Image (cartoon, helix red, strand yellow):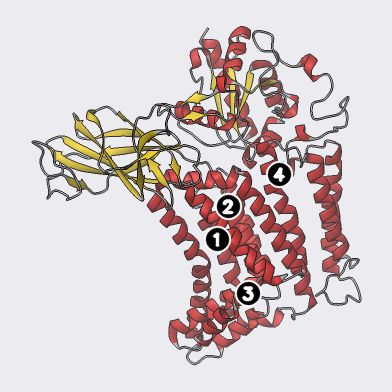
Amino acid sequence: MYKLIRSLLPALAAIIATTVSAQSVSWKSSVQHLDGQNYRIVLEASIPAPWHMYDMGPYEDGPNATTITFTPGEGAQLEGDVEQLTRPERHYDKTFEMEIGTFAQKAQFAQNVKLTAPQATVRAELAWMICNDTSCLPPDDTELTITLPAGATPAVQSAETPDKAGAAAPETVPAAEIVPAQKQAAGGSLWGLIIEAILWGFAALLTPCVFPMVPMTVSFFMKGSGSPALGRIRAGMYGFFIVALYTLPIAAIILITRIVGGDAVTADIFNWLATHWLPNILFFLVFMVFAASFFGAFEITMPSWMVNKTDSKADSKGFAGIFFMALTLVLVSFSCTGPIVGSVLIKSTAGEFWSPIVTMLAFSIAFALPFTLFAFFPSMLKKLPKSGGWLNSVKVVLGFIEVALGMKFLSVADQTYHWGILDREIYLAVWIVTFSLLGLYLLGKIKFAHDSDMPYLGVGRLAMAIVTFSFVVYLVPGMWGAPLKGLSGYLPPLHTQDFVLGKEGSGTVPAGDDARMLLTADGRKPKHSDFLHLPHNLEGFFDLEEAEAYAAKVGKPLFIDFTGHGCVNCREMEARVWSDPQVLDILRNDYVIVALYSDDKKVLPESEWVTTDTGKVLKSLGKINSYYALKTFGVNAQPYYVLQGRDGKELVPPRGYDLDVQGFVDFLRRGVEAFDKQK
């Protein structure tokens, strides 16, 4: 089993890496000074092997050609059309029965611009498609905003840049600014990730791979030659190297991705990780593997040759020896910390690109802190409990927690693709059984392979068992529809539950809902209401045009809710803010609600497809809603609330994730007041 897991994990990692990189064509821009106020914007595409990207065509009834659309801001005007600086490889394609051109590895495009102001910005909208010898990926797109500086001095012409008649030698202007077109909102969830990472860091200390190392390594430093002050400095450096070994590799990988690919590529990767079924299913399986490892089925360890080679260098004097001592600890403790580190990193991929860096820094500081503290206060070593079977119990407890947390990833895939296999009551049933088994384990009623005999029940285990069973009791009413606000961000929405106490009938849509459901302005059932629902029995729409028509008919402002199935903050806002009686009263009586899901994978009928400005055809409900949010409001974040009045005008500034109930009430009331003034 151990060899099987070791062989499968690299394969899973390779699948993830290959899939993510295959989806990404990274773009970067530079600005070249021609003469006077004339500049050239050069866009360069980096195409991952073995894929190729189509040239600009155009092709009628052919492949999706690359399209680049420049929109000049105030103070800039375009000169001529977009040029292909890289010569495409042309060949006859039997499938399309035409000659087509493709790029491999690199492709450059240029657009001349004339400035009429000291500085201006130009927005570039890019769309492309990549294929290999056997398959093609869906068309992709991004936006860049390039700032053109003025007053650059000409330089020697680059050999790769074509000559222009009457133009001075171009010069690449440093610090050409690329402003990302998309930003993801981490909101208040980042602090939650940091706190969770710190708790995981402290929990890792209590595992049998790490805990015995604390007194051993600290004693080693204190017994070394030199003054006590020098010993403390060396111990402090030991803690620093532990933090660096956990944090710097992750930071390097993410920063390289951001520098090479830019904001758009990084955001696309993180969005894919957060919402696509493949990474969520893989993350779920990884969590289950980690849990099995903690239960004692097998151990996930680093190769012995790597540990032995590192340990042999730990005897070196100076900082080099301290570094290798820290590296040895990291490698030796991998069988216990590996699953925890993986859990922390996986959960942080739904935030900003730097969320994994921050969370790993928080984890490593908490993990390394005791090594430094015990070095400064060596008398504390005497108060540490002795190693024993209780350390394995810590691993088992963490295994149960891994099982519970892993269900979230399966739930995201289930909600996004409407599989209907993990409704709220099934999710809760798994949690209730998992934590009930944890409680029984703490009481000594369940024993795993590596557990020691427990002659009596300690006060600590009894206290933990009481807390665990209390949590189970808290979960049980959720099986009959209790909101469980404290866990709203982790549980599937309430509308997925088949039975809710106090409602007539059964099924995800209670009986009688069709009779009292809001109908569209022309008397039809709202689109997508068969698989999408609003929380708290609110009535509304899931299509913007229908909502706008109904709002105009009844004379009410529009409450636009940009949300997502995998959005934890959205569920938390609905459970903690929307549930307030004042908020519900205003939403029910004073607004027409429309919820626009940005990650829903439902493919719409062809008549409802949307073609972007670059010619890309959007087919799924989520992509269409996401495109509308980005194009209209310049955001790609959830939750995001917009109050819209007559003629599509915003009534007040939009609002994002904020758990201040009174602030949300004031936000809604200001919208009503602004709408009344429009009459």
Q: Rounded to the nearest whole Å, what is the CA distance between mark 4 and mark 3?
A: 31 Å
Disc ID at residue 360: 1
Residue drawn at the location 73% of the way across and 36% of the way down = 493
Q: Is residue 72 left or right of residue 273?
A: left
Disc ID at residue 348: 2
Mark 1 closeness class: few <14, some 14–19, many ≥20 residues within 10 Å: many
Disc ID at residue 411: 4
Q: Which residue occupies the foreground of this view, 455 or 170? A: 170
- Say if mark 4 contacts mark 3, CB within 8 Å: no
Mark 2 closeness class: few <14, some 14–19, many ≥20 residues within 10 Å: many
Q: Which residue occupies the foreground of this view, 589 or 134? A: 134
Q: Rounded to the nearest whole Å, what is the CA distance between mark 4 and mark 1?
A: 25 Å
Q: Is residue 489 visible?
A: no
Q: Is residue 246 left or right of residue 659?
A: left
Q: Residue 199 location, x and y as percent?
A: 65, 61
Camera-nearest label, 2 or 4: 4
Q: Rounded to the nearest whole Å, what is the CA distance between mark 2 and mark 4?
A: 17 Å
**Image quadrant assignment for residue 675:** top right
Residue drawn at the location 12% of the way across and 49% of the way down = 155
Circle nearer the N terminus (2, 3): 3
Q: Secondary structure at mark 4?
A: helix
Camera-nearest label, 1 or 3: 3
Q: Give the residue type at disc 4.
A: Ser
Quadrant (top left/top right/bottom left/bottom right) for the N terminus = bottom right
Residue most extreme to the left: 166
Q: Give the residue type at disc 3.
A: Ser
